[in-house]
Amino acid sequence: MTKEEKSIHMLEENSNELIKERLQKLELLKEEGKDPFEVYKVNRTHTSKEVRDNYETLEGKDVTVAGRLISKRVHGKAGFSDLYDRYGKIQLYIKINDVGEDKLKEYKSYDIGDILSVTGRVFKTKTGEITIHIIDFQLVSKSLKPLPEKWHGLKDPDLKYRQRYVDLIINQEVRDTFLKRTAIIKSMREFLDNKDYIEVETPILSSIAGGAAAKPFTTHHNALDIDMYLRIATELYLKRLIVGGFEKVYEIGKCFRNEGMDIRHNPEYTSIELYEAFADYNDMMELTENMIAYVCEKVLGSTKVIYQNTEIDFKPPWNRITMVDAVKKFTGIDFDEIKTDEEARKIASDKDIELKKALGDCTRGDILDAVFEEFCEEKFIQPTFVMDYPVEISPLTKKKRGNDKFTERFEGFVFGREICNAYSELNDPIVQRERFLQQLKERELGDDEAYMMDEDFINALEIGMPPTGGLGVGIDRLIMFLTDSYSIRDVILFPTMKPNQQQ
């Protein structure tokens, strides 16, 4: 047995012993008619924040707080402890003269992690800390397992993701991250609501997985006896609403992609998509940079953030560059001078570019995108819009004005990572059908992420969709930047995990 294995074994033995002791305490409480799990409600008068914020009016008055016991320093006839609730901790002071010997003994028997209701008088200690002088208390839930003092040395390095509820209890930074996440999404809503956008909800289950190039999760609807897909994007439904006359719409919700997992990808993630009639991708650039700047100012107080020791400034205007110019800048290859697919294929071959399909099936546009992805993406540290993507990889996008080899599409990059995607939306049903048919050919060539045909969406376009600008933002990735989180798992409360066989 290695030193590490011995350490783990010892930790497990100690933990089992502590659990045994806590179960014994629970049995004693039950025998005394004090079963904490029989408590149904707590008449809490104040949170810890309310006590702190209103000390001037609450000093000397009785309050009732409730929360988790996270520290205890009670020796002899008096002592201090800390109670934690949603808003942070509040200090408690207990003295035998106020509660009696039996009650003090009971209080001393409580374990770290127990949940209490406490009534007492508000005062300040000599050191100036706002404290509640206990006059009564009740155990309202028993913690039967001890809280880890720290994550280091635990058997499972992913335990904080698997047991997020424990992570939230013991790690203030984690709590702050998820409170910021809530504030970020709230401020996004606020920004769009103030611009008269309508928030909507569209189906998560659909018979067609459309709106993005991605692998869907498949399920089966028993009553209809058909396969269905978890949505990979909300795009096509939101555009139907534009057709229906909802001129400004957005949806914040879950999307699902049956693909790899890494620090930037989780199969279940949160995105926001929005569409505005009578707008184009230039309007979407302006909206994107202004919305994210608004969120930064609202939540962080500044457009400047530090991410992985690098300062990033989201202040508008962001940098703008075409994909062709980006490739030229970072590789020296000028795709404006490359006129044929054969010339492009030679470049791909010479540079050993990884492609999604056979080299002979790749076009100039396919290879331009592949070169950009391999050599350029990581170079964009400060917020940058990369514009004008090849038509081959943008089947839902209007062609570029003056150049039908490209489309009016941009992606936003920060720290070398894509955070958003936007178009001047294709609204020509004849061209859209042609694009879908080409995507079906791409699927036949081995691209299982190519788009499916959606006849009803084409029907909607035939009814008539006005010129429209659309935008999608990966909320989880944005939150990573605004909270300085290394992995996407750090900003998702319950990330997807491989089942633990020991559970």
Image (cartoon, helix red, strand yellow):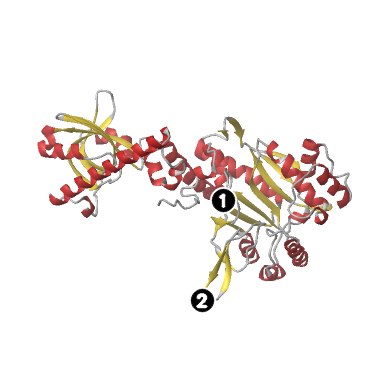
Of the residues under marks 2 and 1, which one precedes in the sequence?
A: 1
The residue carrying mark 1 is: 192
The quadrant the N terminus occupies is top left
The amino acid type found where label 2 is placed reads Ala
For label 1, the crowd category at 10 Å Cα-Cα, with few meaning under 14, some 14 to 19 and many 20 or more, is some
Q: Position of residue 283 (x, y in %)?
A: 68, 49
Task: Tell me the quarter of the picture where residue 386 sits.
Answer: top right
**SS at circle 2:** loop
Q: Is residue 238 above or below residue 322?
A: below
- On the image, the x and y values in percent for residue 236 come to 64, 62
| Residue at point 75%, 57% (across, down) | 398
Q: Residue at x 84, y 49 (%)?
A: 345
Camera-nearest residue between 41 and 124: 41
Which sits in the foreground, 201 or 144? 144
Q: Nearer the viewer, residue 230 or 90?
A: 230
Question: Is residue 251 visible in this depiction of the protein?
Answer: no
Mark 1 falls on what kind of element? helix
Residue that carries the numbered disc 2 in the rendered image: 223
**Residue visible at 83% across and 55% down in the picture:** 360
Q: Quadrant of residue 279?
A: bottom right
- 26 to the left or right of 380: left
- Observer-side mark, 2 or 1, equals 2
Q: Picture coordinates of residue 107 (x, y %)?
A: 18, 39
Residue 284 seen in render: yes
Q: Residue at x 56, y 51 (%)?
A: 192
Q: Is residue 133 left or right of residue 470?
A: left
Which amino acid, mark 1? Leu
